[in-house]
């Protein structure tokens, strides 16, 4: 577990995101695993997760998300281990910024193109944005 | 007592404290900037959604929304090719069929209330979209009081279809809402020629009935309507873009089979469609006419 408060929070959020994205990834490949979410109305995980936008380069977005959260967890360790150096902090911030930018794109696609919201995806988006906020605060030196 | 005036040295120190700003890390400005961008993205998405109707409430009998039509009629070839083949051909040969017409005729006969017709329309529309262009398709559902109630589907009652390779004839005999006596309202009537084909190749006149180029016949549901249970129209159409759900795989498998049958009667055109891996595999399972 990372030693600084910001890194501990970032690490915990990364683990939560990793758990959700691994579940969604496994559910994508194993049809026997049910998708615990509404499949009708505005909240419709099935519509979102089986849409044309649910895969990038042949892989489900959930798999890319799991890789991103694994990277975020590793970087939170690196930031804590190299607390004296600024480059791990900015590397982590850059990683978080990429995640936040992708979330902007995914939110737009969900609302504007697919017209449905996936609750699991929303939870993941909140965690990514949370990690981004944490990393900005950490990099700006607030309360370290 | 007069306040002592500051010495010139003190004035310089005070001035220095005022003119040299406290050093702040500028990354903190990322937070309000991100909040503004996020709000702008959500606003733009909601405005776009309201203009295009994406995800809007769909109604039985309503027009096919553009996003659904795109998902249904523009399925990537890689997804078609990756569809599993169940190996059991559902089409059978029309014995004693008259010489094939040019262009070949695809005749579909069904009814809106029929859940088995509901199932067949998905792969039929998806397959025919590889040869031509539909318009006038509308959302529909099987009867709410029959087996597999409210199976989501499309109705062909106002459909038009243009293709350089084939002619499509569709007949929806009855609607999907029964009257007080339990009868479904009549919608369209068979021509004499269609009625003759229907009676000749489907003696009990059961629906759905599909005949392709006078050679291949389908008189059964290609898969169980239960596969579409709980799905709405958009979910079914959207699933075809990845082809990973059981419903999508069944639709794509049947669609490849229907495509192969059309290719067999239209001279193998268009070549990119008829030569694709999924269609060639499906063609091998088609019943072969006796030499």
Image: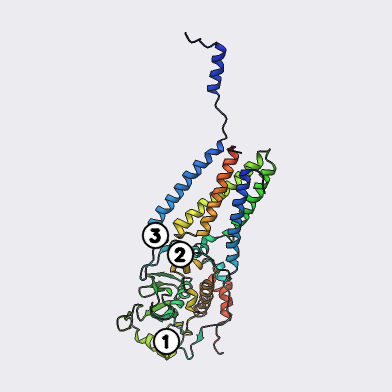
User: CA separation, marks 1 and 2?
Assistant: 32 Å
Question: In the image, is residue B198 above or below residue A90?
Answer: below
In the rendered structure, the residue with mark 2 lies on which chain? B
Callout 3 crowding tier (Cα within 10 Å): few <14, some 14–19, many ≥20:
some
| SS label for mark 3 | loop
Q: Residue at x 53, y 22 (%)?
A: B19
- Image quadrant assignment for residue B173: bottom left
Q: Residue at x 40, y 64 (%)?
A: B65
- Whether residue B48 is visible to the viewer of this picture, yes or no, is yes
- Among the two numbered marks 2 and 3 on one chain, the one whose residue lies closer to the N terminus: 3
What residue did someone put label 1 on? B206
Question: In the image, is residue B37 above or below residue B123?
Answer: above
- Among the two numbered marks 1 and 2 on one chain, the one whose residue lies closer to the N terminus: 2
Question: In the image, is residue B279 above or below residue A127?
Answer: below
In the rendered structure, the residue with mark 3 lies on which chain? B
- Image quadrant assignment for residue A112: bottom left
Would residue B260 be found to the left or right of residue B111 on screen?
Answer: right
- Among the two numbered marks 3 and 1 on one chain, the one whose residue lies closer to the N terminus: 3
Disc 2 to disc 3: CB gap under 8 Å: no
Q: Residue at x 42, y 84 (%)?
A: B207
Front residue of A8/B191: it is: A8
Q: Position of residue A99 (x, y in %)?
A: 57, 50
């Amino acid at each position: 577990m990372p030693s600084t408060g910001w890194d501990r929070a970032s690490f915990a959020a990364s683990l939560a995101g990793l758990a959700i994205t691994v579940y969604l990834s496994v559910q994508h490949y194993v049809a026997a695993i049910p998708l615990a979410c509404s499949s009708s109305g505005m909240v419709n995980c099935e519509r979102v997760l089986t849409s044309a936008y649910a895969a990038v380069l042949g892989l489900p977005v959930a798999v890319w998300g799991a890789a991103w959260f694994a990277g975020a967890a590793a970087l939170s360790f690196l930031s804590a281990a190299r607390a004296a150096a600024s480059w791990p902090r900015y590397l982590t911030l850059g990683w978080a910024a990429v995640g936040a930018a992708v979330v902007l794109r995914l939110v737009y696609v969900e609302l504007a193109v697919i017209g449905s919201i996936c609750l699991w995806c929303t939870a993941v988006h909140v965690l990514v944005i949370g990690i981004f906020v944490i990393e900005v605060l950490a990099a700006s030196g607030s309360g370290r | 007592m007069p306040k002592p005036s500051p010495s010139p040295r003190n004035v310089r120190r005070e001035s220095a404290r005022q003119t040299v700003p406290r050093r702040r890390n500028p990354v903190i400005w990322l937070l309000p900037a991100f909040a503004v961008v996020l709000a702008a993205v959500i606003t733009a998405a909601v405005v776009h959604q309201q203009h295009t109707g994406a995800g809007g409430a769909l109604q039985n009998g309503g027009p096919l929304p553009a996003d659904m039509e795109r998902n249904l009629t523009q399925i990537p070839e890689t997804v078609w090719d990756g569809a599993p083949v169940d190996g059991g051909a559902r089409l059978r040969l029309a014995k004693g069929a008259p010489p094939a017409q040019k262009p070949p005729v695809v005749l579909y006969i069904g009814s809106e209330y029929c859940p088995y017709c509901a199932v067949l329309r998905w792969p039929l529309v998806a397959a025919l979209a590889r040869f031509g262009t539909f318009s006038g398709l509308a959302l529909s559902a099987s009867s709410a009081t029959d087996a597999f109630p409210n199976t989501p589907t499309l109705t062909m009652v106002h459909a038009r279809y243009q293709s350089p390779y084939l002619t499509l004839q569709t007949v929806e005999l009855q609607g999907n809402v029964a009257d007080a006596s339990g009868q479904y309202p009549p919608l369209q009537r068979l021509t004499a020629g269609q009625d003759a084909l229907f009676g000749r190749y489907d003696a009990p006149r059961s629906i759905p009935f599909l005949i392709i180029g006078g050679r291949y016949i389908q008189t059964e549901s290609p898969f169980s309507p239960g596969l579409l249970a709980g799905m709405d129209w958009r979910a079914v159409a959207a699933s075809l873009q990845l082809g990973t759900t059981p419903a999508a795989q069944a639709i794509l498998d049947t669609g490849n089979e229907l495509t192969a049958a059309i290719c067999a009667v239209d001279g193998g055109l268009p070549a990119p469609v008829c030569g694709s891996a999924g269609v060639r595999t499906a063609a091998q399972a088609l019943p072969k006419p006796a030499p």
